[in-house]
Amino acid sequence: MRKTLRFEHKIIIAYLLVGGLWILFSDKMILLFTDDLATISRYQTLKGWFYVLVTAVLFFLILRWYIVRLRKALDKAQESDLLKTAFLQNVSHEIRTPMNSICGFSTLLGREGITPEKQKQYTGIIINSSNQLLSIVNDILCISNIETGQESVNKNSTQVDAIFNEVFNALQPQTKSKDVTLKLNIDSQLMDAEVITDGPKLKQIVWNLASNAVKFTHKGEVVMGCALEEDQLKIYITDTGIGIAPEMHEKVFDRFVQADSSIQLNYGGTGLGLPIAKGYVNLLGGEVRLHSEPNVGTSVSVTIPVQATPNAKSKAVDNRDLKQGESHKNMVILVAEDEEYNYMYIEEIIKSINGEVVRAANGQEAVDICERNSNIDMVIMDLRMPIMNGYEATQRIKKLRPSLPIVAHSAYKEPERHGDKLKGGFDDYLPKPLNQKILNGILSKYRR
């Protein structure tokens, strides 16, 4: 590997090179005008002082430039360290809050004589706290993937009005405890229409911006809207909330930064919502604009290039619920999962919809079972397992039974897509923690 010269080495080399050239050519110049030794000696002295003064000035300017640059880098690093420290403290607090509820109410559920009403109440608290904790973890993973360039774009047909309606309905309960009206404006061109973009990332952008507006608005209104202008999807979120000071308009989109130090104390949160939204907008080739005044309100507009498709209802089934009475009776599903509790949970979910479950504790077992049993209808494959991982097991099973659907199931990032197909031979992806609605959609999609 080629090594880069250090700054001090470059300075020494430059000093010696310039000095040598100066001595060589200046001596020749002097000899052109005189051959008197006394005169030559005086010129040599003047020449030496001239070189010392010039190099001193140059060295001073170069060193000052270099030291100023180092000081700025040090100040920036120290500021970054302070922000990271504050961020970690905030995250620690945000994680401990739902964890306290999960641990506490889980303990209370084990008490004798607890009433069904209390069981239901405690279970609801545990579920809500678990979702809150999962949201924090997802935000941290998202910003990490964005910062390291590991986040990829998977474009597909997306129904924009469905995304806005879903976010609108999810935020409505939060406005009921405030004197806030939540409004939704969807351009007629987007009603029941589809565009080509990354649907999950678009949903995350809308959710982060809209939930942020609701969070910081105590009175007035929050307006969500979208429109389609040629090949540009226009999204806007306006509110009458606390606003943002002008000097913070750019910084609020930086990771670890909140508008001021009182935000965490009064509102909580990790401060990652806006950075994630901007990161996703940048990935989609869009732009974010923010206008805000303290105590007046904030307006955020997003422009994302999309490819419009003819008006049509979305055909996606991944997130649908099972219809009343629908089941997956006689569907045999091989679950390759080495973690006992994870397997127990997915087994309960599949059995609740009348599916039949076969377990493999590692990738090798999954291959052997598929080789011996032709009645397996689908494989749900964990990616990280002992003996043989999910990627290798999938490749071997696909050689035995190319048409057998294999779904990657992992807490890791979704396997990269090549075109419209998942790399590694997988037919679909089921994230951890398991979402029953997504599982229902996948089972329906591949049911024979």
Image (cartoon, rainbow, N blue to C red):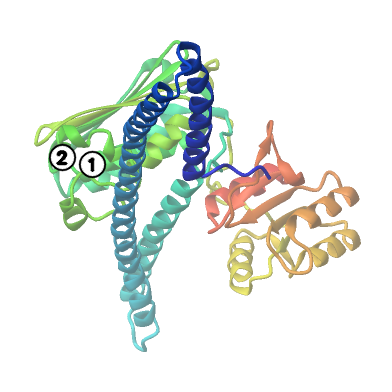
Residue 66 lies, with reference to residue 347, above or below; the image says above
In percent of the image, x 40 and y 84: which residue is there? 110
Residue 234 is left or right of residue 5, and the answer is left
Is 238 left, or right, of 404 in this rendering?
left
Look at the numbered discs 1 and 2 and tell me whether their residues touch, using CB distance below 8 Å. Answer: yes
Vertical side of 289 occupied by 109: above or below: below
Q: Which badge, 1 or 2, comes first in the chain's sequence?
A: 2
Residue at 51 percent across and 39 percent down: it is: 10
Residue 55 percent coordinates (x, y): 37, 32
395 on left or right of 48: right
Identify the disc placed on residue 214: 1
Q: Amino acid at mark 1?
A: Val
What element does badge 1 sit on?
Answer: helix
Q: Position of residue 136 (x, y in %)?
A: 39, 56
User: Residue at label 2?
Assistant: 180
Q: Quadrant of residue 171?
A: top left
Residue at 36% in and 87% down: 111
Question: 236 or 443: which is nearer to us?
Answer: 236
